[in-house]
Image (cartoon, helix red, strand yellow):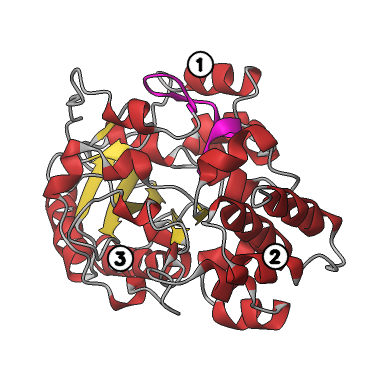
Amino acid sequence: MSDPNFNQIAVDIKTWGAELGFQQVTITDIDLSKYEPLLKTWIDNNYHGEMDYMALNHDKRCHPEQLVPGTIRVVCVRMDYSIESENSLLAMENKDKAYISRYARGRDYHKLIRKRLQKLAEKIQNIAGPFGYRAFVDSAPVLERALAEKSGMGWIGKNTLLINKNAGSWFFLGELFTDLPLPLDSQETDHCGSCNACIDICPTNAFVKPNLLDAKRCISYLTIELRSSIPEEFRTAIGNRIFGCDDCQLVCPWNKFSDKATEEDFTPRNKLDDVQLVDLFGWSEQQFLDNTAGSPIRRIGHECWLRNIAVALGNAPTSANTITALQSRLGHPSELVKEHVRWALTQHET
């Protein structure tokens, strides 16, 4: 077999990626020296909270060749997930209904993207011959946004999310580490300018400054990553957000350019885009497991699910249905659940 034409392979990779459902494919090297001190400072300031995994494997996270020996290039991919055509905060005003972050309303994206990255690797192998690779989708110590930014997929905005000027930020990321000497794409420049909409809208003031997030104050962290009691100082600000928070994306001007996702797996299930809090609060543990099968929501477990909804019900308008729903969980075996239920009931005392 003649030597591979890596310039042509890079072109083919992008064509194959589009055929597999990725909206963009870019290629970068593995020099993350610019990002390493930023990560270290973030950890040293304990901005990661109880996400202990973020403090582990620092060298592997910042040096991809230590995570997968032989790696010299990373193929980055993005897949759009939002099926909504408008970005509005109106959903947060209907306090009787649950707000679930857009990315979590459909099926879990991890397996879907990883399988397609595997198919992409197989196509590359058919042309380049056997080569070293490994696919990642938010599942290992990988600096996804840093690699995507270096690859030219966008820039890390003031809200710490990757922003693409043609697609906003409603997308998932994936990576294919490889030992092939593929040509590199050019890095994008920052286009946030003087806009501070994301920082100003944050309900819990989680941004220390532009591009620096204290996760311990972030609603996504509080409702997804935190397994203990939600600090009372944040409960009212959480509103009706029971799994994640999209506020900083909903107000981002660049998201007016995002396209609606076409992937059927990202279509909301169990009416999670329009459902009453009391209905979700009534799910038994088995119902929770059944209704969240194949969903990223399942990872928080039924206990934290009830904890989150109890807080939201505490912020809901006072009604007989709300009070009855909360009282029904006063005998729950979990002290975590009962503590949040008691707090919620005090919010409805006159």
User: Residue at position x 64%, y 62% from top?
Assistant: 305
Residues 39 and 82: in front is 82
User: Residue at position x 73%, y 48% from top?
Assistant: 343
Residue 65 visible somewhere in the drawing: yes
Residue type marked 1 = Pro
Q: Are marks 1 and 2 in contact (CB under 8 Å)?
A: no
Q: Are marks 3 and 2 in contact (CB under 8 Å)?
A: no
Q: Where 106 sits versus 339, above or below? A: below
Q: Which residues are magenta?
A: 205-219
- Say which label, 3 or 1, has the lower sequence index: 1
Q: Where 288 sits versus 1, above or below? A: below
For the residue carrying disc 2, how many other residues have a C-alpha within 10 Å: few (<14), some (14-19), or many (20+)?
many
| Among the 4 quarters of the image, the one containing residue 207 | top left
Q: Which mark is residue 120?
A: 3
- Say which label, 3 or 2, has the lower sequence index: 3
Q: Are marks 3 and 1 in contact (CB under 8 Å)?
A: no
Q: Which residue is mark 2?
A: 326
x, y percentage for residue 208?
A: 48, 18
Q: Residue furthest front?
A: 350
x, y percentage for residue 80?
A: 26, 59
Q: Which residue is mark 1?
A: 37
x, y percentage for residue 279?
A: 56, 76
